[in-house]
Amino acid sequence: MLKVGHRGAKGHAIENSLQAFRKGQKLGADYIELDVRRTKDDKLIVIHNANLKICGSKAKVRKLTLKQIKQYKLPNKQKIPTLAEALNVIDKAFIEIKVKGIEEKVIEIIKAKKMLKKVVIISARSGVVKKIKEIAKVKTGRLIFKRVTRDSEMIKRALSENADYVCPPFSKVDAAFVKKAHQQGLKVFTWTLNKPKKIKLAKEYKVDAIGSDSPDRL
């Protein structure tokens, strides 16, 4: 079972910051999960929300250049990192693509860092994972959200995009689902587990990877 640090180690440091990535690895995470978006001038930065709420601003990421975004600071006084800067301090990563149209740029950066075998690219955006598979030999995962209720539909979506992982929230996971996924050749990555009871259950279900704000608890 892979231990995945959610946004680095969100429970211990400011999410998606270089500090959080280093902390997550120090706490034993096998992989660091992070979110990627595109700026106005087509640069890739690591941030979860579509705006700069984490910096105390309502400004939209897609309407600002990288230079403008670098003028803002996270609550820990660090700057929002680019994808390249994040990968400089991360050994292995689950990279969530938050918007369409950046697939080739993401792969370009990963290749430049010689990390194709050290990442899993995940996305909830329809078609993104499929496109990634078409342009690079890299592991992928199809994120599924709570509105999808049937096991068969979650698995179908992952298979239709040639994903390696199906990635639902833990509320949608049980032993039967994991078994069905494994029978279809899929691995299961579930999130975000912070309580010991749920972590224990996930292990009993034989999931392949768990995301947590506190990877040390895994």
Image (cartoon, rainbow, N blue to C red):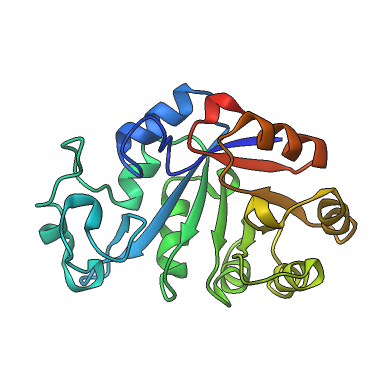
Q: Which x, y percent locates residue 216?
A: 54, 24
Q: Is residue 209 left or right of residue 75?
A: right
Q: Which x, y percent locates residue 196?
A: 64, 29
Q: Which x, y percent locates residue 193?
A: 59, 40
Q: Is residue 137 left or right of residue 39?
A: right
Say which residue appears at 34% left-offset and 33% top-offset: 13
Say which residue appears at 44% left-offset and 75% top-offset: 100
Say which residue appears at 85% left-offset and 53% top-offset: 182
Which quadrant does the N terminus fall into?
top right
152, 140: nearer the viewer: 152
Q: Which x, y percent locates residue 200?
A: 72, 31
> Would you identify the image quadrant in which residue 30 lies?
top right
Q: Is residue 44 left or right of residue 41?
A: right
> Would you identify the image quadrant in which residue 126 lies?
bottom right
Q: Is residue 109 left or right of residue 140?
A: left
Which quadrant does the C terminus fall into?
top right
10, 40: nearer the viewer: 10
56, 184: nearer the viewer: 56
